[in-house]
Image: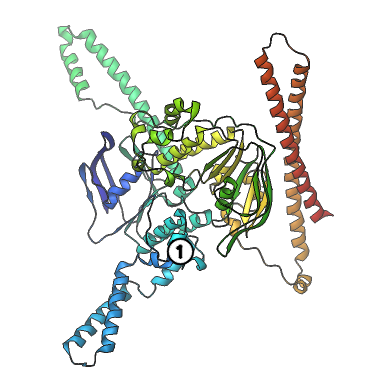
Amino acid sequence: MFSLNNISLQFSGVEIFNNVTLIINKRDRIGLVGKNGAGKTTLLRLLYGMQKPDAGSISIPQNTSVGFLPQEVSFKGTQSVFEETLNAFEKIKSLKETIDRCNKLLHNLTDFHSDTYAHTISLLNNANEQFALLGGYTVDAETEKILLGLGFDSSQLHLPVGTFSGGWRMRIELAKILLQKPDLLLLDEPTNHLDIESIQWLEEFLLKYPGAVIIVSHDRTLLDNISLRTVEINYGRLYDYDVPYSLYIKKRDERIAQQQAEYENQQKFIDQTEKFIERFRYKATKAKQVQSRVKMLEKLEKVEVDLIDESSIYFRFPPAPSSGKVVIEAENLSKKYDNKVVLSQIDFLIDKGDKIAFVGKNGEGKTTLSRIIVGDLSCEGLCKTGYNVALGYYAQNETELLNPDKTVFETIDDVAVGEIRPKIRNILGAFLFGGDAIEKKVKVLSGGEKSRLALARLLLKPVNLLVLDEPTNHLDMKAKDILKKALMQYDGTLIIVSHDRYFLQGLTNKVFEFKNQKIKQYLGDVNDFLKSRNINTLSQLQAPPSSPLPSSQNDKNPSQNKINREKKKEADRQLRKIKNIIARFEDDITSVEAQLKDLEHQLANPNQSLSATAYADLFKTHENLKQKLDSLVHLWTEAHEEHDALNAEYFS
């Protein structure tokens, strides 16, 4: 049993914990929740011993171990992935070195009756026994199993760690901790750099894990699948619920409602009692009753209603400047790193107003194509931006690019120019950096606070093409929802890389699937994409295709007709879905055409009461509607082409 006992802690006069207590049992699965900056990471650091409390004590049983995966890890050295991961087994590595030294020494000894020989044999036997007890003969197999489960390919295991991005290095660190099998496992946002397939593997691993687990995550599904307890940090207090995350929300609201009812009833009682005291204070016949009620109020334990932190970021992206109809054009685009081909001869167009999701397994080229589009990487073939395209880019490692020694204000002030400079404090306030918080150094910010700061920089200039690579990493659930709302209101072109199905729902009108060095386009949002692929989750993108039987076997298979019927049935379903999409585009086209007709009537019959500025606005609105109509007609045409191709394939 691990425990925090009456812990209190302050940073720069700000109270983080106020006399909190927490008990962790051997097989607990605890989801640790709270807003960004509430103290979740600090609590993990206290348990790991990286930080000391101002008051209280931390109890760690003897002969138990604690493993901690922080949000950020710095790597040094030139070892391979496999060698770096094997560093998790320090004791086994030391024993292996002892065994090798003993064997080498015995090979050179000739006096089998000497004390040196006897001592070396004894040392070798002891080392071999401990090596076997600690699983030394299976560490290589266990290490490979964990690394493959976390998404590494067998061919990558012997590449230098330095050739991998920060996200992949975090997977190496996670693998090392999982291999150590500590009695208490502390995971701070472990899924930020994992694809869906690896997240599901981690879920299964943690469900079978023999020790206790405390996990900080903003992934609702992960918390519901793993946690049996939810501990909330709110205004320096801990609230412990013996339920998974979804049920915790309900229980918390019920508790607050009950407290509110008790508080209101108590206030009524206090009010009535005070009125009685005031009314009969000076009547001798009531003196005894008055004194009794005075003492009752003095001893009354006041009901307090726990506060729920309702603070949240609020922002909208600036209106997008006008651009050409074609925003990005690519022909025969290819990209390789050394001898590894990531993208091979791909073609695509991104039109003005498109909202596109990049999906697929890690390593298939989503981030690579994003960086090519924004000009961070070169490529073979053509990739060019259209007329008047202004780019805004949020990189997957955006928080790592912030200068840790600058303050929050300096980070924004250094890149703000022109008329936006007087609005810096307002922008920071919208991202919850108010008051003294703007003077905090970047290096003391939590992962979520760094993400908010990086997002705030996107508002410093109007852009008409936003490229966002995993923007929800480190953001809490409320911040995710607000970012999604802002993106849905954004009137420019959007490209977003994400593994979060719930975040992507309703956000995009196209999906680019990355697989086998190619991309395939789908109309609609992520749900339409999953339906068209006849799958339920993004993790199923990597399911191996069923192998067709040889033609001779097909002829002999009595169920082949049934299979064909099922294929046609599925094609018919897809056709109906595309027809619905076409119908929606036609409704939108009709609506825009009606708005254009009304505007053209106003412009053709001038109203003398309207100012020149008002007329200019009418012309601008007319131009925007024409561009929107062009985009809708283009999408309608693409949908028709997809419908005709599918119809020809299965029903011609």
Corner quadrant of residue 557:
bottom right
Q: Position of residue 537 (x, y in %)?
A: 58, 52
The image shows residue 352, relative to residue 195, as above or below, that is above
Q: How many marks?
A: 1
Q: Position of residue 118 (x, y in %)?
A: 20, 87
Tell which of 643 and 74 is nearer to you: 74
The residue identified by callout 1 is 147
Q: Position of residue 437 (x, y in %)?
A: 35, 32
Q: Position of residue 374 (x, y in %)?
A: 57, 45
Tell which of 109 and 328 is nearer to you: 328
Amino acid type assigned to the residue bearing label 1 in the image = Leu
Corner quadrant of residue 602:
top right
Tell which of 238 and 165 is nearer to you: 165
The image shows residue 92, relative to residue 1, as above or below, that is below
Residue 498 can be seen, yes or no? yes
Where's the N terminus, which quadrant? bottom left
Report the residue at 66% width, 20% height from top.
617
Corner quadrant of residue 303:
top left
Residue 244 can be seen, yes or no? no
Q: Is residue 594 left or right of residue 365?
A: right
Report the residue at 77% width, 55% height from top.
568
Where's the C terminus, which quadrant? bottom right
Q: Is residue 294 left or right of residue 269?
A: left
Report the residue at 20% width, 18% height from top.
293
Q: Is residue 356 left or right of residue 230?
A: right
Q: Residue furthest right?
A: 652
